[in-house]
Image (cartoon, grey):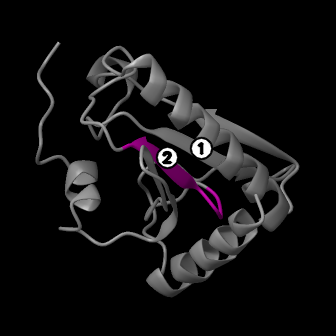
Amino acid sequence: MPDYDTNNLFARILRGELPSHKVYENDKTFAFLDIMPRAPGHTLVIPKAPVRTILDIALDDLTELMKTTQMIARAAVTVFTADGLTLQQFNEQAGGQVVFHLHMHVIPRKNGITLKPPASVKEDPAVLSEQAQKLAAALKGA
């Protein structure tokens, strides 16, 4: 497997070199909205550890990643009045991974509404900011 690239987009977001619409952060994880969401509220949850895929992460960090993913998922269902969720995680190019820093996609779903194609429409930053604020507020009580 290739080495971890410390200049990947998510590593740069973690270092504050690129902006993001932060939803949640703790000492091991960071969650932010996808700028090209497949549905409203599409959130990415990443470990702060420099890991490329699920094969590289320490068990304690993976456990924290999944705890945060579940917490975000619960809040997203409430905030976006979702009928369900799609959770996605890809590993390496052959598995569909585009940014080579481990990440979970949390996508709120509504019955009868199909997902937008991946990386197809960049959302208005004002919309993302509002959605991030709503999710963050819902998480304060979590």
In the displayed structure image, the side of residue 64 where residue 13 appears, left or right: left
Give me the C-alpha separation between circle 1 and circle 2. 7 Å
Q: Nearer the viewer, residue 94 or 105?
A: 105
Residue count near mark 2 (Cα–Cα under 10 Å), binned few <14, some 14–19, many ≥20? many
Q: At 50% from the left edge and 38% from the top edge, which residue is drawn?
A: 104
Residue type beneath disc 1: Thr
Magenta highlight on residue 18: no
Q: Quadrant of residue 87?
A: top right
Q: At 53% from the left edge and 76% from the top edge, which residue is drawn?
A: 128
Task: Determine if residue 136 is in view.
Answer: yes
Residue count near mark 1 (Cα–Cα under 10 Å), binned few <14, some 14–19, many ≥20? many
Q: At 43% from the left edge and 38% from the top edge, which residue is drawn?
A: 103
Q: Can you identify the residue that label 1 sits on?
A: 68
Q: Which residues are magenta?
A: 39-47
Residue type beneath disc 2: Val
Q: Earlier in the sequence, mark 1 or mark 2?
A: 2
Can you say whether 79 is above or below 115 in the image?
below
Q: How many marks?
A: 2
In the displayed structure image, the side of residue 90 where residue 38 appears, left or right: right
Can you say whether 61 is above or below 107 in the image?
above
Q: Can you identify the residue that label 2 sits on?
A: 45
Q: Nearer the viewer, residue 28 or 70?
A: 28
> What is the quadrant of the N terminus in the image?
top left
Residue 43 rendering spot, x and y as whole percentages:
55, 54
Magenta highlight on residue 46: yes
Q: At 45% from the left edge and 18% from the top edge, which residue is drawn?
A: 59
Can you say whether 118 is above or below 125 in the image?
above
Q: Nearer the viewer, residue 1 or 27?
A: 27
Q: Secondary structure at mark 1?
A: helix
